Every structure is written in structure tokens, then in C-alpha cells.
Image (spheres, rainbow, N blue to C red):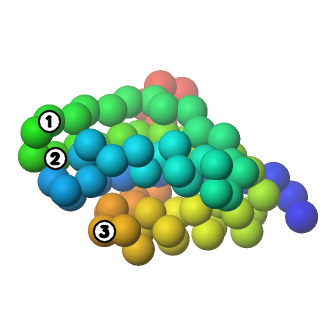
Amino acid sequence: MASIKKLVELDYPTELVTEPVLSHMIKKYDVNVNLRRASITKGFGYVQMQIEGEEQEVKKALADLAGKGIDVHPIEKDVLES
């Protein structure tokens, strides 16, 4: 299966801001991430990142984040690459 790259934004609920969800996702699904931008406060967090790996692993990893209550949004245009 082919390796893919996706740009996504993650919006974290308050209760997950201090949890190592990305670290766990990377270990569980054998994906790589490149953080592009992030902002974390006491009550909210967001991360813009590129995720890379086998297509099925990337899909499962993003679905797992969504299942934890993190909003996952695709990024259509990356301002760092324009």
C-alpha cells in the first residue's frame, strides 16, 4: 500500500489539552507527524500538522483522534508552502 501525506488541523477539547494524544497515536499507528503550527491554552488547543504513513494507518490514526473528541479538519492550502 502507498504512503500518503495529509495536512490537518486538530482542535482539542479542554480535557485533552494536557494529554499526550499525539505521542500515543504515533506509537500505535506507525505514522510520522510534522507539526506546522500549534497554540495551547488552559482551555483549548489546536495543532496544524502533516501526517504521513501508510494510507490505512493514517486513516485509522485520524479516526482514533476523532473518537477521542478531537475535531479533525483537512487543510486545503498550507500557508507555509504558498
Q: Residues within 10 Å of mark 2 (few under 14, many from 20)?
A: some
Residue beneath label 1, please?
A: 41
Residue 25 lies, with reference to residue 50, above or below; the image says below
Identify which amino acid the numbered label 1 is placed on: Thr
Residue 6: horizontal and vertical position, in percent? Answer: 60, 51
Is residue 43 left or right of 15 when viewed as pictured? left
For disc 3, the marked residue is 69
Cα–Cα span, label 1 and label 3: 17 Å
Residue occupying image coordinates x 50% and y 68%: 64
Cα–Cα span, label 1 and label 2: 5 Å
Q: Secondary structure at mark 1?
A: loop
Q: Amino acid at mark 3?
A: Gly
Residue at position x 11%, y 39% from top?
Answer: 42
Quadrant in the rendering for residue 79: top left
Badges 1 and 2: C-beta atoms under 8 Å apart? yes
Q: Residue at x 41, y 74 (%)?
A: 67
Q: Is residue 42 left or right of residue 68?
A: left
Across and down, in percent, residue 26 comes to 61, 47
Q: Which residue is mark 2?
A: 44
